[in-house]
Image (spheres, rainbow, N blue to C red):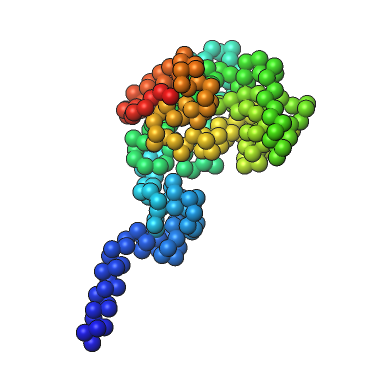
Amino acid sequence: MRNILLTIALVGFLAAALPSRVAAQDCECSSDECCSHWGSCGTSDAYCGTGCKSGPCFAAPTTDPVSVPDIVTDDFFNGIIGQADDSCVGKRFYSRQAFLDALESYPQFGKTGSVENSKREVAAFFAHVTHETGQFCNVEEINGEANNYCDETVTQYPCNPEKGYYGRGPIQLSWNSNYGPAGESIGFDGLNAPETVANDPVISFRTALWYWMEHVHSVMDQGFGSTIRAMNRDLECDGKNQETVESRVGYYSQYCQQLDVDTGDNLTC
């Protein structure tokens, strides 16, 4: 009888010592699995990494602290696009509603960590968008037809010789190596109809959010400077194009101030 009582006590102690694993049961996962942001179970980075809700998460579980639409208010969005000239194509193309419609496909955007982190991610995203489009003025890269951006070494996404893969959309999606996988993920023919990004405002914002979540979102905790490097790799960093770096940092600082959050460290790259 004494041994039975000791066994019961030990089991109880171990259960109390492993709250993260027991918490996984809230998602109906097994005790050694993580519950992902979407409510599915697994053990890889996709489940236990960013956005993990419960179980043996690699990082602190997300709390979804704020609603991104509550951050990107009409006043915030219009404060950016309102600076564009009335003659700008983008002023009649981009809208807050198109952004919100696109956002539904990317529920993890601006939803990891604290309220402050969420605000910084929103500020960072729109800082880059503002710089890339000129306050939402441009839908396509200026003189983009002269820059085809075809990387023939990317055989998985072969270029259509009749199409141009120059910058389009809020983050100026470029290269066949981006148009191909973005189209696959979002649901349009990125290689044979890249112009869709400049014709459909929701798809346009989806490509921006796709690129962000694929290449930028994961470095947000390293500071805004890391997002600049993730956006343009080495084209602007390490002293190569200080003017554009300062432009992006300026917008980011401005939007952080508007959202009442500090900028954090490591602003430049």
Residue at horizontal 46 percent and vertical 39 percent from the top: 218
Q: Is residue 188 left or right of residue 74?
A: right
Kindly indicate the quadrant of the structure image that contains residue 164. Answer: top right
Residue at horizontal 27 percent and vertical 78 percent from the top: 7
Kindly indicate the quadrant of the structure image that contains residue 148. Answer: top right
Q: Position of residue 180 (x, y in %)?
A: 67, 36
Quadrant of the image containing the N terminus: bottom left
The answer to whether residue 220 of the structure is visible from this angle is yes
Residue at horizontal 44 percent and vertical 52 percent from the top: 48
Q: Is residue 158 left or right of residue 44?
A: right
Residue at horizontal 59 percent and vertical 12 percent from the top: 87
Quadrant of the image containing the C terminus: top left
Q: Residue furthest left?
A: 2
Q: Position of residue 93 (x, y in %)?
A: 59, 24
Q: Residue furthest right?
A: 162
The answer to whether residue 70 of the structure is visible from this angle is no
In the image, residue 172 sits, relative to residue 32, either above or below, namely: above
In the image, residue 111 sits, relative to residue 92, either above or below, namely: below
Q: Position of residue 24 (x, y in %)?
A: 40, 60
Q: Position of residue 60 (x, y in %)?
A: 36, 48
